[in-house]
Amino acid sequence: MKIEKLKFDENGLIPAVVQDYYTKKVLTVAYMNHESLQISIKEGHTCFWSRSRQEIWRKGATSGNVQKIVSITADCDYDALTVEVIKNGPACHTGADSCFNEAIYQSEESNAFSMDALYELIEGRKTNKQEGSYTTYLFDKGLDKILKKVGEECTEVIIGAKNNDNAETIYEIADLTYHIMVLMVERGISLADIANELAKRHVIDKKVKQETCKAE
């Protein structure tokens, strides 16, 4: 699509909804003018027009929280953009992962389980400790306790699988996943960090190649 087809407003701007490529979470809404859009495409990182400072704003130029662009898509009217990015650090100037954190309305469906919601819940048990919370207890005990639990749950997964008991294995994998996420929060590792690492690999091909080499 040619930039010339886009419809910039009377101030020469077009709204850009920035979305995490892996989680699809909306990170922020910013504005681009013709120049900043061209810079974004040329450099491969988000560049916006700051309405408050009235100047070009390369995201992360001072903070280091750059956003690598995966795709830019226009809506059907060509007057708004969606920018999918792989982010390096928080998207919000407050230090939050996303600028959208203040709930105005939530339906019953919003309580559906997600890995992101679980991660945020675990994170909250570390930053806002709750008496009687097992997760808070793990954080209070520290890294060695968390690692011990991860090791124990790994063993339980192996036992469940060796018993050919899928129900037990699923239960233990869920326990292991939870404790690994506690470890991730403790070490400051995000779900996006893991997704980014997996995206850089051809996991199956590499493992097969390694096993073939060992066999030879």
Image (cartoon, rainbow, N blue to C red):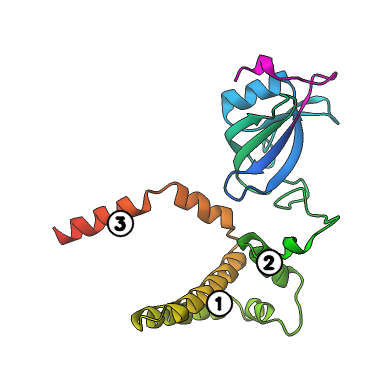
Q: Earlier in the sequence, mark 3 or mark 1?
A: 1
Q: What label does residue 207 carry, if any?
A: 3
Viewer-side label of 2, 1:
2
Q: Quadrant of the N terminus?
A: top right
- Above or below, 46 against 110 in this view is above
For the residue carrying disc 3, how many other residues have a C-alpha within 10 Å: few (<14), some (14-19), or many (20+)? Answer: few
Residue 98 coordinates in the image, percent (x, y) = 72, 49
- Above or below, 101 against 121 in this view is above
Q: In screen coordinates, is 169 left or right of 44?
A: left
Q: What label does residue 146 carry, if any?
A: 1
> In terms of depth relative to the viewer, which is nearer, 80 or 128?
80
Q: Quadrant of the C terminus?
A: bottom left
Q: CA distance from mark 3 to mark 1?
A: 28 Å
Q: Earlier in the sequence, mark 2 or mark 1?
A: 2
Q: CA distance from mark 3 to mark 2?
A: 32 Å
Magenta part of the chain: 1-15
- Is any atom of residue 162 visible in this view? yes
Disc 2 is placed on an element classified as: helix
> In terms of depth relative to the viewer, which is nearer, 164 or 29?
164
Q: Amino acid at mark 1?
A: Ile
Magenta-colored stretch includes residue 12: yes
Viewer-side label of 3, 2:
3
Going 37% across and 48% down the picture, which residue do you hit? Answer: 202
Residue 145 coordinates in the image, percent (x, y) = 55, 81
Q: Amino acid at mark 3?
A: Lys
State the residue position of label 2.
Answer: 123
Predominant secondary structure, magenta span: loop
Q: What label does residue 15 carry, if any?
A: none
Q: Amino acid at mark 2?
A: Glu
Q: Earlier in the sequence, mark 3 or mark 2?
A: 2
Going 78% across and 54% down the picture, which residue do you hit? Answer: 101
